[in-house]
Amino acid sequence: MIHQSEIEMTNESLNLQLCKRVNASTLKFFVKRHQASNITDEMLRLLKRAMKSCKTARRVVIGCQLCYMYNITDQGVKSLSEGLQRLTSLQSIDLSFEWCSEITDQSVKSLSDCLRTLISLQSISLNFDWCFGVTDQGLKSLSESLQTLISLQYINLNFTGCYDITNKGVKSLSEGIQRLTSLQSISFSFSGDKEITDQGLKSLGDSLQKLTYLQAIDFNFGQWEKITNQGLKSLSESLQKLISMQSIHLNFSECQNITYQGLESLSKSLQTLSSLQSLDFSFDKCDTITDQGLKSLGDSLQRLSSLQSIRLNFGCCRAITEQGLKSLRDRLQTLSCLRNLVIYPERR
């Protein structure tokens, strides 16, 4: 069997005859960036036909990418979803709809109806960056379908710039993932979704506690203007129970209501994570984080002897001094397994 086949979609055609000859485990339908704005729902309808001949595929990537396809609507996504349903052996799916401004919750529902039938799925990546028509209702549909995917090990969902998503949507999604006990890696981005508060962060944290096999998280909460120390404390209390955790990436850039006290809560939660190998925190433009917060972080990280990679971003944190940064760096350089250390800024 061919391991991978790539088939180009253009604004004029999709080579259906080539699709019929494909016998590949990984199938990539791709669009050149300069042609993206010309792709229409009709092309996705043709893609649906193409998938009928590709039933052996175990991984499908629709990309390079569907982003910036302004003419794609809910009807096109429905056709795509119906095509994917035919790939009964599918184990991995990777779709990007970045800046597809015409799609709405109905598209998310179509995809959700598709996902619930693909019971062999182990990996899902869906990107709805700047899809302004996606709201809490879309997340509710997605959550209901995820609950059926008991083999799922990896999930990556991006809702950056979906401004109508609120705590209600985050809670729905959290309730969906907490039943996926095989999950090993979660990546969520809600950057810029300004209606989410501490309660949304607590809902997400509560769901994590039940995922005992979880080894990696990557959460982007940048520009959550309503997040405070209390929300970070709630998440931290959940993180400390995930003793299998190996990689943590948290982005709280421009969350200006987070102070050194929030960083202290997060730091203390790390002390139980003895298997942690990689850590990446960003608190860029969090003006009320001080040297005291850095000291607490350094004290905790010094205890994690398995750490191999640390990246810390405190850019534009005006209350932090050069002495605080130097002290933190000196502490972390004593870690015996550390191979990569990046602290920004390097100095004041």
Image (tube, grey):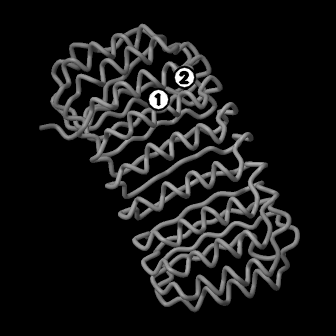
- Compute the Cα span from label 2 to label 1: 8 Å
Q: Quadrant of residue 279?
A: bottom right
Front residue of 318/236: it is: 236
In the rendered image, residue 314, in percent from the top left (x then y), is placed at 75, 67
Horizontal arrangement in the rendering, residue 37 relative to residue 62 (left or right): right
170 over 254 or under it: above or below: above
Q: Residue at x 53, y 33 (%)?
A: 139
As drawn, is 261 to the left or to the right of 203?
Answer: right
| Percent of width and height locating residue 263 | 71, 71
Assess whether mark 1 and mark 2 are in contact (beta carbons under 8 angstroms): yes
Observer-nearest residue: 160 or 325? Answer: 160
The residue most toward the left is: 1
Q: Residue at x 43, y 31 (%)?
A: 63
**Residue 101 sits in which quadrant?**
top right
Q: Label 1 amino acid?
A: Ser
As helix, strand or loop, the secondary structure at mark 1 comes to: helix
Q: Which residue is mark 1?
A: 141
Name the quadrant of the C terminus: bottom right
Q: Find numbered disc 2 in the image and state the secondary structure of the residue it sits on.
A: helix
The residue under label 2 is 105
Q: Which residue is the extreme one toward the right?
A: 318
